[in-house]
Image (cartoon, rainbow, N blue to C red):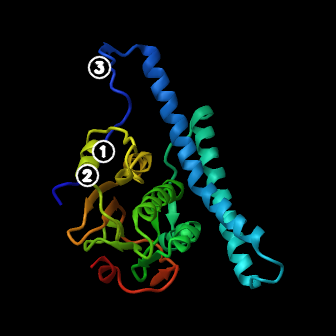
Amino acid sequence: MSDNISKPRDILPDPTAEKGGAAKTPEDLTKEVIFKVLGDFAHELRNPLNAVYGYSQLLSQMEDGAMPPEKVRDYAETINSGVRQALQVCERVLANAVEDVPEVQTKPVDVGNLVEEVIEMLGNIAEQKEIDLRATVQANFPKVETDPLLLRQYLLNVVGNALKCTPPKGAVEIRANLSAEGDAMIIVVQDTGPGIPTAILSQLQMGREIIRSVPEQIGFGRGLRISQELAEKLGATLELYTDPAGGAVCVLRQPIAKGGGKSSATGDTKKKRGPPLDALAR
């Protein structure tokens, strides 16, 4: 795990950086900050809106009676979740801009339910590529004091990247567990794609934006950098590396208080069944 990121980096423009051989002006820096904020905002809206678009398109193409009512209800609930996520992102940005409110707003969160929401929102992408998208949540996982909006944003980014980079008929797995000491929540996202190139990891470590100019870099851009920032806001560490057997691995570790209420998620949450991830990776 020598090529990893153990701590998120600050990516705001460096005032000492040069542009075209000359020091950047205050106007240049202001533009960079504005473009970054707008770009990040658009990126975070795109994730849930993709789910809304995908599932609404499926519903619009179905003939009357061609889909069981319970399936229609599932799709409608996923669309609702996507709209709610987009609205919450907008509300948080507006609140931070005009009111004196905390950037991070924590409450007891059922991690199992939150992971299931993410799987449902991204399930259409997985189905289109025939990817086995699955999650395993430790039994009797306690409710965790965290920011549900930021944690959901993090998972949408990381799992979304994994789905982009994983070839058809591959697998993406989410695993949520407590540390052995019970003082940290650990969420691992692992895929059977090509892994994260060393050059990309190096650029992320230096806080640089990834320019996706070649096919090998698809999926390694703004999303991973935003994921680092979200992890930092949550008070968590984020480790990124390529598994020796292949595939990218993202490990979020957030300190938590021991004890707490019990979650309703007491076992596996799966989008669909398939062979174990390690078997697919071989």
Q: Residue furthest front?
A: 214
Name the residue: 40% across, 61% down.
Answer: 165
Residue 171 location in percent, x, y?
40, 75
Which of the two discs, 1 and 3, labels the residue nearer the N terminus? Answer: 3
**Residue lying at 36% horizontally and 62% vertically, measured from the top left:** 256
Residue that label 3 marks = 16
Identify the secondary structure beneath mark 3: loop
Real-space Cα separation, disc 1 to disc 3, in angstroms: 19 Å
Q: Indicate left or right for 80 with 116 as reference.
A: right
* Tag 2 and tag 1, C-beta contact below 8 Å: yes
Q: Helix, strand or loop at disc 1?
A: helix
Where does the C terminus fall, quadrant-wise?
bottom left
1 and 3 marks in contact (CB < 8 Å): no
Q: Which numbered tag is attached to residue 204?
A: 1
Quarter of the image for the N terminus: give it.
bottom left
Q: Name which residue type carries label 1.
A: Leu
In this rendering, which labeled residue sits more in front, label 2 or label 1? 1
Q: Amino acid at mark 2?
A: Ile
Disc 3 and disc 2 in contact, CB within 8 angstroms = no
Q: Where residue 147 is drawn, which disc sits there?
A: none
Residue at the left extreme? 2
Give the x, y percent position of residue 33.
47, 28
Report which quarter residue 22 is drawn in: top left
Q: Nearer the viewer, residue 165 or 42?
A: 165
Percent across and percent down for residue 8 are 32, 46
Residue with the mark numbered 2: 5
Closer to us: 264 or 22: 22
Disc 3 or 2, which lies upstream in sequence? Answer: 2
Q: Residues within 10 Å of mark 3 (few under 14, many from 20)?
A: few
Quarter of the rendering containing residue 49: bottom right
Disc on the earlier residue, 2 or 1: 2
